[in-house]
Amino acid sequence: MIAVERLRKRFGRQLALDDVSFAVPKGEIFGFVGPNGAGKTTTIRILATLAPTDSGMATIGGIPVGDDPSAVRELVGYMPDFFGVYDRLTAVEYLEFYAACHGVARSRRRRVALELLELVDLGDRREAQVDTLSRGMKQRLCLARALVHDPRVLLLDEPASGLDPRARVEMRELVRELRRMGKTILVSSHILPELEELCTWVGFIDRGRMVAVGPMEQVRDRVVAGRRLRIELVQPEETAMRSAEQVLAERPGVLAVDLLGDHIEITVGEGVEEAELLAHLVREGVPVRSFAPVAGDLSEAFMRLTGPGEERSAR
Amino acid sequence: MAVLSGFDNPLIVKDGISRMRSWRAPLAITLYLGLLGAFGYAIFTIAVLSTQFTHSASSAQIGGSVFVSLAFFQLALISLFAPALAAGAISGERERQTFDVLLVSRVSAFGIVWGKLVASLAYLVLLILTALPLFAAVFLFGGIDFEQFVLAHVLTIMTALSVGAVSLFWSALFRRSLPATVTSYATTFFLVVGTFVAGLLLTYIYAFRDGVAGASNFEFHPLAYGNPLFAMYVVLASPSGAPVHLGRLLQLLFMSGGEPSRWGPELEPWKLCIGFEMALTVLAIFGSVLLVRGRRAMPLRRARPAVAEAAP
């Protein structure tokens, strides 16, 4: 549904995007992850038809963003990383205004506005002036604003930024609900545990380059879990643990061995086959009860992929 | 999208609602009418008192002098209000961080500029309309033709439109409302006062240089013809006064010598002023549309084959 191919964008001397490529299948929630200044907002602005590219190609629903921006705007609902609201308009008037801006027929505007207010759980605040709403409510209202023309694609730039935990949960549920409604959603955020729960696809960007992209589990496992293994012994006694530690430490490719109470966690380098390592342990008489990769963690993947000097690609 | 570009423009409705719900709206109307009323009453009192010395003043003379004073004062007030209303119209959207969201909607760049201009102008027209009873009361004294009454208001509205359009251009150019407002006031001062003073000065300089000062073939400098104060002065003195052929005006503008040209229609200052203000308005709107359009990603490249949709 969203396809970005070799996108380049330069601001003066600074290269903001350097051959950025990724694709978001229809109906998926794509988490766009990267440190500040990595190029997330620039990419989203290009997709929202707000910024031109220097080279490369971005399409939404098969329509090139740079060639037919009007058609793309029909498909896209955009929620920027800041929420500007108008003073002295009620919530329902606010949505009616944007419905009018998106060409919704006059006879349908009020109904659309009221339905969206219900969707974002602001039905009881429809006559409240927008500037009197809490931050979380304003964020939800802004999400409703992005939906007034029933777009197929949503571009959400840091939608949970600055929200309290309750408001974040509400926002997360709302995004899930939108996915159930068939929307394809690209969401950027710094709150990684939430992205991990929410997103089905993920893309990491660092200093203008995509460093990993794909289905969430695949990327996470590729980046984190494939390098960390958890080993439990039949009887986790000190002697057995020490013996196992020694066997592991002597094995080529094992980078680190950590004794963590009742189990051992090891870090292995590239090219280490898990099956071979397990067979080696058994041969050496280590009483292994379980041997499994450590479940991946998006924050860890983020740190690994966006660390200083990192230029690896997990693609 | 023509429907969004006309008066059925959501920005006009939204700005109208926002503005009229503000405490500033009734305050500005009160202030405007209060100043106009106080000024009119002061002129009226002076005019009545002066009859003790002239012994010949009629109600028409009193009405005429009050109307003339009010018309100039209203023009000055509108020139002060217009930049305040229009200079923050687009830059204010940027400052509120609502501009990008507006740009990704279906409203065209022209729709945005037009909506903002009409919304600002609508409030100025409201101010002028609320002052109409005051002018109508003075009109009853006599001394002013209906034609002068209408032309004075047309000139005021056109000045509001042109000053508003120019201020909107600065609002589209600058990211912040403060520099947009300062530049708008400077431009308004130049258009309303600067061209008037410069036009009259140049008129007298050339008249003395050519030795025609005080003569019947005394001609004003072209700068004066584009000025609303000069046009208002001539309208209130005599609507058909000081006409000039278009050819002669161009001759004076480009300082070419020879016999006075009689080419083109003979135009009174109010017609030339309105023409100049309309041209300025069109240019300012055009410039603003280009600036707003520049904020969107333009389709500059030729279409290439779409990238195939990602596999699910």
Image (cartoon, coloured by chain):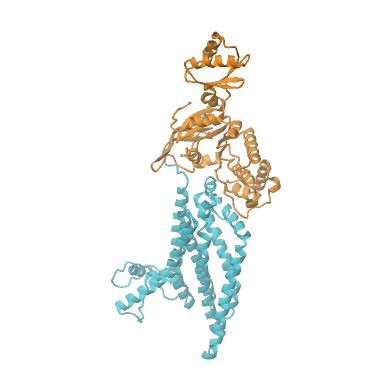
Chain colours: A orange, B cyan
Is B44 displayed left or right of B228 in the figure? Answer: right
Residue A54 location (% of width, % of height): 41, 39
Most foreground residue, B83 or B214: B83
Q: Residue at x 60, y 63 (%)?
A: B25
What is the number of callouts on the image? 0
Residue B225 visible in this rendered orientation of the protein: no
Between A12 and B236, the one nearer to me in the picture: A12
Q: In this view, does A225 lie to the left or right of B263?
A: right
Residue A60 % position (x, y) = 52, 35
State the image quarter where residue A19 is shown.
top left
Instruction: Find the residue positioned furthest to the left.
Output: B258
Q: Locate the C terminus of chain B and report the quarter of the image it occupies.
A: top right
Left or right placement of residue B69 versus residue A53 in this view: right
Q: Nearer the viewer, residue B152 or A167?
A: A167
Measured from the top left, where is residue B230 in percent x and y?
44, 73
Q: Nearer the viewer, residue A136 or B50?
A: A136
Q: Which residue is drawn at 54% across and 73% down?
A: B149
**Percent position of residue B28, x then y:** 58, 66
Mark yes or no: residue A250 visible.
yes
For residue A165, above or below residue B236: above
Residue B292 vertical position relative to residue A206 in the rendered view, above or below: below
Q: Is the residue B257 above or below the residue A112 in the image?
A: below
Taking the view exactly as shown, the residue that stands out farthest to the right is A124
